[in-house]
Image: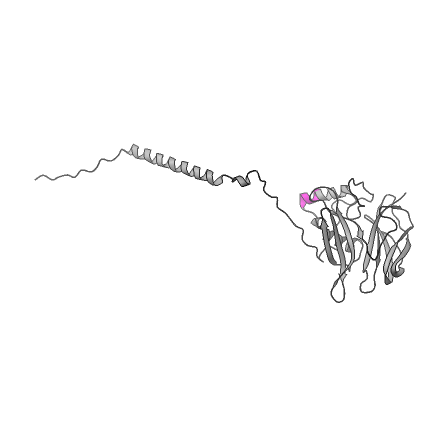
């Protein structure tokens, strides 16, 4: 009896097998490409809409403000610089747009002295480091409106409350989003400094005066220039009453064309300096 041999189905040639594998791989790749294209297609609601630029906010002013800030990378000039379109007298820390632009270059290249972008730190540094009113180590109020700012600086009373000695007025000097803050004056209330007029040209000696409301006041006046610092001062002048005039002659020494910050301060009741006011003038020839 002969054995029956079970026949196996014929196998496909090897070349056909590889051809089918190639076809399947091509289909997989095509489907993947179509899915990826659909997923990456932007929606109509976002087409053409620019991504919002990141916003930054300066750190809030604090008592850690540098009392004597490091000099700016470009030393300010002693002469008044023309500032087209700037409605104020630049007082500190820059003499004008040239100095401000020099700082901007150093900030953009190396991040130098970022405190120039903080109105609170600038006002506090001006008060403590430039005017020398060290005990005024509190930021009591902050108002910023576009390119101007009003910063209250003051001290703590014995019962722990904040008291405002002055409201320092600042303005952005120069152009660009990183234009620095510049001190341009003060918003005066019960102690005013009205003579000499803001932006006036003066010679030495100059009569400095205004009005005051208070009791047993002792007003002291100083004149400062960016490069030379203190260039003149007066002895204390007694004052007081209700909106009472006060005045005192002040001698100073500074070259013609120099910009001076004149500051009047009074205190002595609970702090050495309890109120102050400033104005900006130019030395005449």
Residue lying at 75% horizontally and 54% vertically, measured from the top left = 151
Residue 155 seen from this side: yes
Vertical arrangement, residue 186 with respect to residue 4, above or below: below
Q: Position of residue 218 (x, y in %)?
A: 87, 61
| Magenta residues (range) | 105-110
In the figure, is residue 102 to the left or right of 195?
Answer: left
Quarter of the image for the C terminus: give it.
Answer: top right
Quick one: 284 or 159, which is closer to the camera? 159
Quick one: 27 or 66, which is closer to the camera? 27
Outermost residue, front side: 45
Q: Position of residue 91 (x, y in %)?
A: 80, 48
Vertical arrangement, residue 276 with respect to residue 23, above or below: below
Quarter of the image for the N terminus: give it.
Answer: top left
Rendering colour mode: one colour
Q: Position of residue 15 (x, y in %)?
A: 30, 32
Outermost residue, left side: 1
Residue lying at 72% horizontally and 52% vertically, measured from the top left = 143
Q: How many marks?
A: 0
Q: Quadrant of residue 5?
A: top left
Residue 108 falls within the magenta-colored stretch: yes
In the figure, is residue 159 to the left or right of 253?
Answer: left
In the figure, is residue 114 to the left or right of 205?
Answer: left
Q: Quadrant of residue 10?
A: top left
Quick one: 94 or 227, which is closer to the camera? 94
Quick one: 244 or 182, which is closer to the camera? 244
Residue 165 falls within the magenta-colored stretch: no
Q: Position of residue 99 (x, y in %)?
A: 76, 43
Looking at the magenta stretch, what is its main secondary structure? Answer: helix
Residue 68 seen from this side: no
Q: Quadrant of residue 75?
A: top right
């Amino acid at each position: 009896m002969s054995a029956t041999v079970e026949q196996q189905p014929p196998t496909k040639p090897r070349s056909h097998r590889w051809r089918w594998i190639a076809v399947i791989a091509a289909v997989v790749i095509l489907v993947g490409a179509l899915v990826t294209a659909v997923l990456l297609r932007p929606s109509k609601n976002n087409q053409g809409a620019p991504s919002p630029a990141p916003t930054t906010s300066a750190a809030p002013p604090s008592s850690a403000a540098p009392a004597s800030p490091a000099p700016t990378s470009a030393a300010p000039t002693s002469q008044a610089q023309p500032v087209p379109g700037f409605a104020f007298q630049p007082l500190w820390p820059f003499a004008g747009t040239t100095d401000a632009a020099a700082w901007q270059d150093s900030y953009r290249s190396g991040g130098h002295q970022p405190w120039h972008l903080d109105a609170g730190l600038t006002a506090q540094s001006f008060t403590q480091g430039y005017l020398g009113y060290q005990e005024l180590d509190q930021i009591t109020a902050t108002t910023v409106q576009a390119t101007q700012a009003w910063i209250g600086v003051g001290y703590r009373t014995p019962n722990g409350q904040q008291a405002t000695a002055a409201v320092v007025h600042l303005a952005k000097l120069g152009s660009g989003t990183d234009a620095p803050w510049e001190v341009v004056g003060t918003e005066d209330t019960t102690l005013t400094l009205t003579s000499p007029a803001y932006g006036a040209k003066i010679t030495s000696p100059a009569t400095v005066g205004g009005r005051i409301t208070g009791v047993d006041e002792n007003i002291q006046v100083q004149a400062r220039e960016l490069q030379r610092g203190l260039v003149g001062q007066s002895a204390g002048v007694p004052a007081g009453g209700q909106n009472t005039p006060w005045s005192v002659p002040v001698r100073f020494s500074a070259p013609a064309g120099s910009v001076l910050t004149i500051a009047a301060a009074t205190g002595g009741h609970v702090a050495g300096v309890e109120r102050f006011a400033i104005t900006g003038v130019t030395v005449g020839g």
